[in-house]
């Protein structure tokens, strides 16, 4: 298949202009056409860079209609999105997205659960692409230059201009061709099953409840390095920033970046001159200086942040023997992963994603120490591995665990004399 015409090179795009869908009857027609297409491209836009609570602002769809690619820009600010559930859910056609995490979370917040997906960013990463951004991939694989000038645009603004509609359509119009190119490469390398497993794992993670439920001030990078009194000041500063951001309907970072709040917590300014000095020339601090100073004083009066809001150290509950075994297994698996990737001529993520190394080590160690016979059951219960890896690697992993255990026993005997 010849690559599409590069619009930046002076050619003309044969596809029809995107449709703006802002009526219920238009949406029903698009949903039906997409259902018949069997595979669609999907992207969404929010206003997270411009609002305190981001919302779903635009939804773009593309599908093949004969020898053309049709594109629609759905306006969820004027239309209910419920009719899209049948299309976007797991029972609908395959959805091709690029880096699905944001899309899945925003759709879930709008009441629609994404399912039956392929993620071109995952495919590119597993194929070892040096750059996995959409524009870079479309350029490298299809020879098309995407316009990304509106990447930070506030998509809650209306009405859309013709240029904005064309930009929105551009993010989905080439996804199907990109998916074709990446899928062919994946089939040639024999890694399509691993890509499918990773897409499913990524989607499940995006739809799962957030794991980090700590207050926002505790999640500021550098919080753990502060003294208790400084932590108390940071807590009050973050609370004040949040109040200002909510009132102005802007993201908190637009009121004050974390770096400024950390500087204030450490230096604890007592007057406007000290406050200004903490901010520096290039750092913004929105709001009345006296109110910021008041937040500092309240933090100092607190003396320490509430104990029930602090991260709790959790004991591992592991024996010294299991800790030692896990260390050996981690080293052995990392080395094996690199060697296997070289042997197969694939990226190391294909052999074993980095985020699965720790859980795999834990499962192998537990099975070795407790009940070696149930290893396959333990591995099958681990998300993100998939049947393709279990079939290929369950035995090699078992042998690695046996060797790690034998080496640990020899070491213990040597030390015990």
Image (cartoon, grey):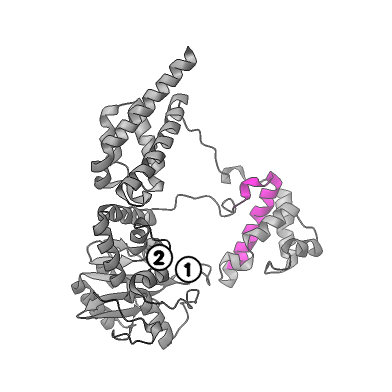
Res 391 → quadrant:
top left
Residue at the image position 62 percent from the left and 50 percent from the top: 222
Disc 1 from disc 2: Cα separation: 9 Å
Residue at the image position 36 percent from the left and 26 percent from the top: 369
Q: Earlier in the sequence, mark 1 or mark 2?
A: 1
Report the side of 58 relative to 270 (left or right). left
Tag 1 near tag 2, CB within 8 Å: yes
- Magenta stretch prevailing secondary structure: helix
Q: Secondary structure at mark 1?
A: loop
| Residue 353 position (above or below residue 132) | above
Question: What residue is disc 1 on?
Answer: 54
Return the x and y of residue 218 as percentages of the image width and height. Answer: 58, 50
Label annotation for residue 209: none
Q: Residues within 10 Å of mark 1 (few under 14, many from 20)?
A: some
In this view, the residue in front, 132 or 38, is: 132
Residue at the image position 33 percent from the left and 73 percent from the top: 142
Residue furthest to the top? 417
Q: Secondary structure at mark 2?
A: helix
Res 368 → quadrant:
top left
Residue 163 among magenta residues = no
Return the x and y of residue 354 as percentages of the image width and height. Answer: 41, 47
Q: Residues within 10 Å of mark 2 (few under 14, many from 20)?
A: many
Question: What residue is disc 2 on?
Answer: 106
- Residue span colored magenta: 221-245
Return the x and y of residue 233 as percentages of the image width and height. Answer: 69, 52
In this view, the residue in front, 223 or 81, is: 223
Residue at the image position 23 percent from the left and 74 percent from the top: 1
In this view, the residue in front, 129 or 352, is: 129
Q: Is residue 115 visible?
A: no
Report the side of 144 relative to 183 (left or right). right
Q: How many marks?
A: 2
Q: Is residue 197 visible?
A: yes
């Amino acid at each position: 298949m010849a690559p599409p015409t590069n619009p930046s090179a002076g050619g003309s795009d044969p596809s029809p202009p995107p449709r703006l869908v802002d009526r219920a009857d238009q949406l029903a027609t698009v949903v039906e056409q997409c259902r018949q297409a069997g595979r669609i491209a999907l992207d969404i836009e929010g206003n997270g860079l411009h609002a305190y609570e981001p919302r779903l602002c635009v939804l773009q769809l593309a599908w093949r209609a004969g020898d053309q690619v049709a594109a629609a820009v759905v306006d969820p600010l004027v239309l209910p999105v419920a009719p899209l559930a049948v299309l976007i859910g797991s029972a609908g056609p395959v959805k091709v997205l690029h880096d699905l995490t944001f899309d899945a979370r925003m759709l879930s917040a709008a009441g629609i659960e994404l399912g039956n997906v392929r993620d071109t960013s995952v495919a590119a990463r597993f194929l070892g692409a040096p750059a996995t951004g959409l524009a870079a991939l479309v350029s490298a694989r299809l020879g098309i230059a995407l316009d990304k000038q509106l990447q930070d645009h506030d998509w809650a603004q209306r009405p859309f201009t013709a240029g904005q509609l064309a930009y929105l359509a551009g993010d989905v119009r080439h996804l199907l061709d990109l998916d074709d190119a990446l899928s062919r490469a994946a089939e040639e390398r024999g890694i399509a099953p691993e890509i499918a497993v990773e897409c499913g794992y990524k989607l499940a993670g995006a739809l799962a409840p957030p794991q980090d439920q700590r207050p926002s001030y505790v999640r500021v990078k550098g919080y753990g390095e502060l003294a208790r009194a400084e932590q108390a000041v940071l807590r009050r500063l973050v609370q004040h920033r949040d109040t200002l951001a909510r009132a102005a309907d802007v993201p908190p970072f637009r009121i004050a970046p974390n770096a400024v709040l950390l500087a204030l917590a450490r230096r604890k300014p007592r007057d406007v001159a000290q406050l200004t000095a903490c901010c520096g020339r290039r750092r913004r601090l929105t709001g009345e200086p006296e109110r910021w100073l008041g937040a500092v004083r309240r933090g100092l009066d607190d003396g320490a942040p509430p104990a029930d809001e602090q991260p709790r150290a959790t004991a591992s509950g592991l024996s010294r023997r299991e800790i030692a075994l896990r260390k050996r297994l981690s080293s052995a698996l990392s080395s094996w992963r690199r060697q296997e990737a070289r042997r197969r001529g694939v990226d190391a993520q294909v052999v074993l994603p980095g985020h699965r190394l720790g859980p795999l080590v834990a499962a192998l160690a537990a099975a070795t120490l407790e009940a070696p016979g149930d290893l396959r059951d333990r591995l099958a219960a681990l998300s993100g591995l998939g049947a393709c890896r279990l079939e290929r690697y369950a035995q090699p992993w078992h042998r690695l665990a046996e060797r790690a255990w034998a080496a640990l026993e020899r070491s213990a005997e040597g030390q015990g004399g």
